[in-house]
Amino acid sequence: MPRAVVLLSGGLDSATVLAHARRQGDVCYTLSFDYGQRHRAELDAAKRIAEELGAREHREIPIPVGLYGGSALTDTSIDVPESGGEGIPVTYVPARNTVFLSLALGWAEVLGAGTIYIGVNAIDYSGYPDCRPEFIEAFQALAALATKRAVESRPVRIEAPLIELSKAQIIRRGIDLGVDYALSVSCYRADGQGRACGRCDSCRLRREGFAAAGVDDPTRYV
């Protein structure tokens, strides 16, 4: 069976992507990153989701991008916003998806995996530049140049199956795929028990998505 590496943050979108990859018939190897984020709740959620959705192997890798600061997700001196705004928000983590995909690309080569799945979304997203189709296309071009597989005419494919879906559409697809969203954590400020604050931008998008999808929100709020 074909193998795939799935970037799994522990949130709603990445859980849906893992279920999608499994439905495609891929043997899935999931990858999470401890990059210095404010809490471990999403990393704990990623482990639960990987087990529940039948990942062959789950790995958590520490990377030091949070040491740079510059993001409300890694620097506690920067407040997490409670409403959306214009431009790129302070929750953007510099170069995060570029680093994530680079490390996933290396593991995919070692595994002989033909696909990397990432749950970026360009519609109901917070304004991050590395969640756009142009970014995925650019990284695909890099993967087609910089790897042994590519030289041997077997480049790794970068798949972003949610990139053009609304949050409500993502949730409906996940429900059809059997995703238990109660296992996931999306909140930027989740507490030690994994409960969501209910006020940050990520909570807002998640709550609105469930309402628009007509699905009960299983999120545990403080």
Image (tube, helix red, strand yellow):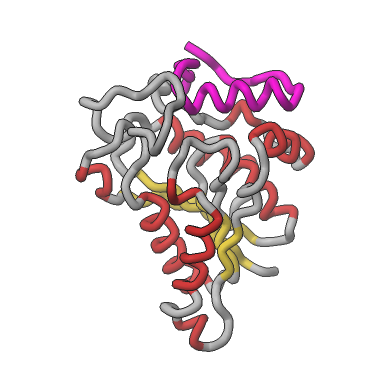
User: Would you say residue 187 sits in the magenta stretch?
Assistant: no
User: Can residue 18 be seen by looking at this rendering?
Assistant: no
Give coordinates of residue 23: x percent, y percent. 74, 53
Res 34 → quadrant: top left
In the rendered view, does 152 fall on the left or right side of 85?
Answer: right
The residue lying at 49 percent from left, 28 percent from top is 202
Residues in magenta, as a range: 194-222
**74 or 58, nearer to the observer:** 74
153 to 5, vertically: above or below? below
In the rendered view, does 130 fall on the left or right side of 137?
Answer: left
Res 117 → quadrant: bottom right
The residue lying at 41 percent from left, 78 percent from top is 146
**174 or 124, nearer to the observer:** 124
The residue lying at 33 percent from left, 33 percent from top is 90
Give coordinates of residue 77: x percent, y percent. 21, 25
In the rendered view, does 79 fall on the left or right side of 141?
Answer: left
The residue lying at 51 percent from left, 81 percent from top is 149
Res 67 → quadrant: top left
Looking at this view, name the residue that lies furthest to the right: 176
User: Can residue 49 be seen by looking at this rendering?
Assistant: yes
User: Would you say residue 218 sits in the magenta stretch?
Assistant: yes
